[in-house]
């Protein structure tokens, strides 16, 4: 019964929000909150977005000027994945007739245009200290939105729990997979305190180990525990592993040690090598890409690298702090 009452109250509030008066803009209606709106496609019975929902939208907003509107943002040019869609958790309304209010009028697959106060958008929604130089008091913003998807807070919470469960499962599987790999490959070398397994496969000609600040050149081939090659500096290995890229040069990787330019497992292993030496290094995810993974590397992946220290150049002497 309470749910039905809440639904009725929500419907009444939405009717109050969108009850309209005549707008001074052709083709638009004016809501009680002062926002002007025009739907191009509307599912009037569809479930509308509410505060706390995860919304996926395509959006363009521009300063409404005569004769030509000035586009300030187009999600087609600014989305993270190139799809033109941006995703965020819908916050509470920042002012009456806000962008948030506009989105809360929309259901999945709706498309519409809204005219709102530019002053309030910049100062209240974006929390700027002053209007940007291209805007002046009284300006309006023309905002065009396509609602791609709406995920309720409940859906988001369930997805989060599912992801956390998957991450926990992958974490629990890492050590058994490593143990099976070591057993299958008859590797008995003890790990270092950090968990790195370092196996020298060829002695180097040099005697000195690299140190932090030195610039090293490394040849390498990186594999997952199942043997899948995910990256290499060696052309033949790239072709054999079906990861060859004709656009990249296949040559030793050069970088300074101790500056965080490579994963921690590499930093530790290279300090144990000498010029000309080759090694197999088995790096737990805690010293590699961790619970997030990266590119072709899944979360909680132990990595196996065959590496060669091709060259070492002494770095600048380290200054002691005063």
Image (cartoon, rainbow, N blue to C red):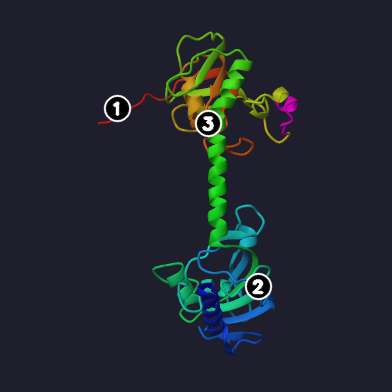
Q: Percent position (x, y) of residue 104?
A: 56, 72
Is residue 144 inside the magenta stretch?
Answer: no
Q: Callout 2: few (<14), some (14-19), or many (20+) C-alpha neighbours within 10 Å?
A: few
Q: Which sits earlier in the primary sequence, circle 2 or circle 3?
A: 2
Q: Quadrant of residue 292?
A: top right
List the residue tagged with mark 3: 285
Residue that extends furthest to the left in the rendered view of this protein? 322
Q: Is residue 306 visible?
A: no
| Residue 72 higher or lower than 299, as above or below | below
Question: For the stretch drawn in magenta, what is the main secondary structure?
Answer: loop
Name the residue: 48% across, 18% down.
191
**Front position among marks 2 and 3:** 2
Q: Quadrant of residue 230?
A: top right
Name the residue: 52% across, 65% down.
90
Q: Quadrant of residue 107?
A: bottom right
Q: Callout 1: few (<14), some (14-19), or many (20+) C-alpha neighbours within 10 Å?
A: few
Lateral position of residue 289 relative to residue 238, left or right: left
Q: Which region is colored magenta? A: 238-245
Q: Callout 3: few (<14), some (14-19), or many (20+) C-alpha neighbours within 10 Å?
A: many
List the residue tagged with mark 2: 46
| Residue 215 higher or lower than 42, as above or below | above
Q: Percent position (x, y) of residue 125?
A: 46, 69
Dot 1 falls on a residue whose secondary structure is loop
Q: Which sits earlier in the primary sequence, circle 1 or circle 3?
A: 3
Tell me the tag on residue 320. 1
Using the image as rendered, state which of residue 286 and residue 14 is in the foreground. Answer: 14
**Front position among marks 2 and 1:** 2
Question: Which quadrant would the C terminus be assigned to in this image?
Answer: top left
Q: Percent position (x, y) of residue 268?
A: 46, 23
Q: Which sits earlier in the primary sequence, circle 2 or circle 1?
A: 2
Q: Looking at the image, how many numbered discs can be counted on the residues?
A: 3
């Amino acid at each position: 019964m309470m749910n039905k009452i809440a639904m009725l109250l929500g419907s009444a509030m939405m009717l109050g929000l969108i009850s309209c008066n005549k707008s001074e803009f052709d083709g638009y209606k004016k809501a009680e909150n002062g926002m002007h709106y025009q739907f191009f496609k509307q599912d009037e019975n569809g479930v509308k977005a509410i505060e706390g929902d995860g919304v996926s939208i395509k959006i363009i907003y521009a300063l409404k000027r005569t004769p030509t509107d000035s586009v300030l943002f187009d999600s087609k040019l600014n989305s993270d994945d190139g799809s033109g869609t941006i995703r965020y958790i819908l916050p509470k309304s920042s002012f009456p007739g806000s962008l948030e209010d506009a989105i809360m009028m929309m259901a999945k697959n709706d498309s519409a245009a809204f005219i709102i106060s530019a002053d309030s958008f910049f100062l209240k929604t974006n929390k700027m200290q002053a209007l940007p130089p291209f805007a002046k008091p009284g300006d309006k913003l023309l905002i065009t939105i396509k609602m791609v998807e709406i995920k309720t807070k409940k859906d988001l919470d369930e997805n989060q729990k599912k992801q956390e469960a998957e991450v926990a499962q992958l974490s629990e599987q890492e050590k058994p997979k490593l143990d099976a790999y070591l057993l299958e490959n008859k590797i008995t070398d003890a790990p270092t305190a950090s968990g790195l397994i370092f196996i020298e496969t060829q002695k180097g000609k040099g005697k000195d180990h690299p140190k932090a600040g030195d610039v090293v050149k490394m040849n390498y081939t990186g594999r997952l525990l199942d043997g899948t090659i995910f990256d290499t500096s060696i052309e033949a290995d790239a072709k054999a592993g079906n990861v060859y890229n004709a656009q990249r040069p296949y040559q030793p990787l050069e970088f300074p040690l101790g500056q965080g330019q490579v994963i921690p497992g590499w930093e530790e292993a290279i300090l144990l090598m000498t010029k000309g030496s080759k090694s197999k290094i088995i790096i737990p995810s805690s010293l590699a890409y961790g619970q997030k993974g990266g590119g072709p590397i899944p979360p909680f992946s132990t990595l196996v690298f065959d590496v060669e220290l091709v060259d070492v150049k002494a770095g600048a002497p380290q200054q002691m702090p005063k």
